[in-house]
Amino acid sequence: MTLTETKIKGLFVIEPKVWRDGRGYFYESYNEKEFSKAGIKANFVQDNQSLSQKGALRGLHAQQDPSPQGKLVRVIRGRVIDVAIDIRKSSPTYGQHIAVELSEDNHKMFWVPPGFLHGFLTLEDNTIFTYKVTNPYDKASEIGVRWNDEDLNIIWGIDASEVILSEKDKELPLFKDFVSPF
């Protein structure tokens, strides 16, 4: 398992060692010892999974106190563009983002700690996305910003007319109007 910190401190791309044979494949999707050696201290309390059609965009969300969430995300089936935005006010990379393609073929995972907005766009029908979280969902703690905010300059690689959003995500504020609690 290789854990590589991105140019934004705290965000890691994880590439597991995959063993393949005539039966299929096997890999460790989480190893506390390896994560701890990389400086990631996470106590996972819940696993979540979603099924989405091509063009579904979920995000950009985070949870603030008292229930900030760290997320270890991966794709079981399909492909996504996964994005994390630094919202730690004291960070030199505040407002910057990392985008990673996660797929059933590359088996990559992405560690998104508290202090980041997170979202993903599905690139294939019937994409199954799963994530381990460090706090359960808490509606009262949820915060977010609009996925297509020009100030964030996220390249999603899809025409806006093809994006499928929840009503909640359509109403999120722009980043310039967002006040980070981190």
Image (cartoon, grey):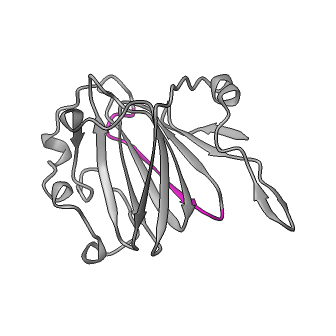
Position of residue 53 measured from the top left corner of the image (x, y, whole percent): 39, 72
Q: Residue at x 73, y 49 (%)?
A: 27
Vertical side of 104 occupied by 68: above or below: above
Residue 8 percent coordinates (x, y): 48, 36
Identity of the residue drawn at 63% across and 43% down: 14
Q: Quadrant of residue 162?
A: bottom left
Task: Give the percent coordinates (x, y) of residue 128.
Answer: 49, 62
Which residue, as the protein is rendered here, is positioned at the far right?
Answer: 22
Count the numbered circles shown: 0
Whether residue 40 appears in magenta in the rendering, the answer is no
Magenta-drawn stretch contains 94: yes
Identify the residue at horizontal 66%, vertical 38% (top origin).
3
- For residue 167, what is the image quadrant? bottom left
- Vertical order, 25 against 95 (above or below): below
- Viewer-closest of 19 and 173: 19
Pick the front one: 81 or 152? 81
User: In the rendered structure, which segment of residues is drawn in magenta?
Assistant: 93-105
Indicate the quadrant containing the C terminus: top left, top right, bottom left or bottom right.
Answer: top left
Residue drawn at the location 45% of the way across and 75% of the way down: 125
The percent coordinates of residue 175 (x first, y second) are 20, 44
Image quadrant containing the N terminus:
top right
Classify residue 76 as left or right of residue 24: left
69 or 100, which lies in front?
A: 69
